[in-house]
Amino acid sequence: MALKSFIEVHPDSHFPIQNLPFGVFRPDTASLARPGVAIGDYVLDLSAVASASIFDGPILKDSDCFHQPNLNKFLALGRPAWKEARATLQRILSSTEPVLRDNAAFREKSLFLMSKVEMLLPIAIGDYTDFFSSMHHAKNCGTIFRGPQNPMPQNWFHLPIAYHGRASSVVITGTDISRPRGQGYPSGNSPPYFGPTQKLDFELEMAAVVGPGNELGKPIDVNDAAEHIFGLVLMNDWSARDIQAWEYVPLGPFLGKSFGTTISPWIVTLDALESFACAAPEQDPKPLPYLAEKVSKNYDISLEVQIKPDGQKDSCVVTRSNFKNLYWTLTQQLAHHTINGCNLRPGDLLGTGTISGPEPESMGCLLELTWNGQKPLSLNGITRKFLEDGDEVTFTGVCKGDGYNVGFGTCSGKVVPSP
């Protein structure tokens, strides 16, 4: 018999009992932040569950990890603790278990309508790294900037390329994004352009949330890397393409990327995603031994981007892609990150890079969709080369199960004028 919750969950919901993603919320502005899990239209307060001594397994029994303002302490406990928590939560939320179902007072202090709470960043992010792991995205960008004869950098098929991003500007969904200012390419003999970016873009990404880290100088084996990944969030790594193009040689992205990165509030665990695992693409040439996996897998996560122009009633779908389009896997990304001895820590965020597919409608950013502004996009009769002030961009991600979904909710942000 399929697992079912005593809480009614709509068939289209992203948050059935098979999911139970983790986040951090507060019931109102006067309350303290606390961890929770999503179930249907509700948030279950994990601090209330912990206070009731329901987490009685060997790892979590005496832990205060659910009395923290973020999930970092829980992440540091590792997969055995995550599995223990998931099993306990699925048990108490199931239709056959009375502990919460039949206790009205307990339900009242532990279950909150999601529409009424404030969602916060679920983790304290010490470091943020952004990869470049989609072959289709890399080829499209290379063709735009270098031409079709030499679109791919020589190193791309040998290692997961990445750069170190700015953790301080990672924000939760719903946060406005101010149009950044910076320098752009000079025109003729004039000085470089300076002012608000004229090529503001979204980037359809996901990000892995690191659990237990590693000691400085001790790399993580690629075949053990999944033990160090708690789960995934949706991520919009906003980009100012004109600022980025002028500054990125020789040291890579800086002001063109560091002004804002939006993530969804719910972390969907790898355990919840396991039913949707699929084979990763064949890698040619074969990766070096430290990147060679015994089992190389991705996840079948359908991704969608909508843009709602300012003043318009309806959003317009501009992209449909899938996480399984990634060439370099999450575990390869993490193992490569540590192969030089770099130490990762609980709560670190590892972005995948833009997730583009092989079809024109699966391109993961406006740079590709409009071919750097040469082919304007139509949004219900309104054209866009790049994002304009007032545009609201919303990402969704969902796995389709047998009679249920495992989803990520939404990741959205609205562009506001430069200050």
Image (spheres, rainbow, N blue to C red):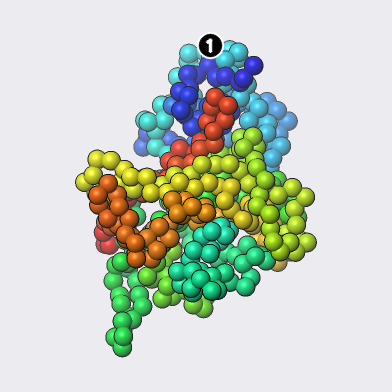
Circle 1 packing at 10 Å, graded few (<14), some (14-19), many (20+), is few
Q: Residue furthest bottom?
A: 189
For the N terminus, the image quarter is: top right
For the C terminus, the image quarter is: bottom left
**Residue 253 vertical position relative to residue 191 in the rendered view, above or below:** above
Q: Nearer the viewer, residue 214 or 284?
A: 284
Going by the image, does 219 lie left or right of 208?
Answer: right
Residue shown at 65% from the left, 52% from the top: 281
Residue shown at 27% from the left, 55% from the top: 383
Can see residue 165?
Answer: no
At which x and y percent is residue 126? 55, 56
Can see residue 192?
Answer: yes
Could you say whether the residue bearing mark 1 is in a helix, strand or loop? Answer: loop
Going by the image, does 191 lie left or right of 406?
Answer: left
Q: Quadrant of residue 5?
A: top right
At which x and y percent is residue 32? 44, 37
Residue underneath mark 1: 102
At which x and y percent is residue 12? 46, 28
Going by the image, does 193 lie left or right of 300?
Answer: left
**Residue 329 vertical position relative to residue 118 in the rendered view, above or below:** below
Q: Residue furthest left?
A: 311
Q: Quadrant of residue 3?
A: top right
Q: Nearer the viewer, residue 319 or 194?
A: 319
Residue shown at 57% from the left, 35% from the top: 66
At which x and y percent is residue 77? 67, 42
Residue shown at 39% from the left, 37% from the top: 118
Give the amino acid at mark 1.
Asp
Q: Nearer the viewer, residue 150 or 124?
A: 150
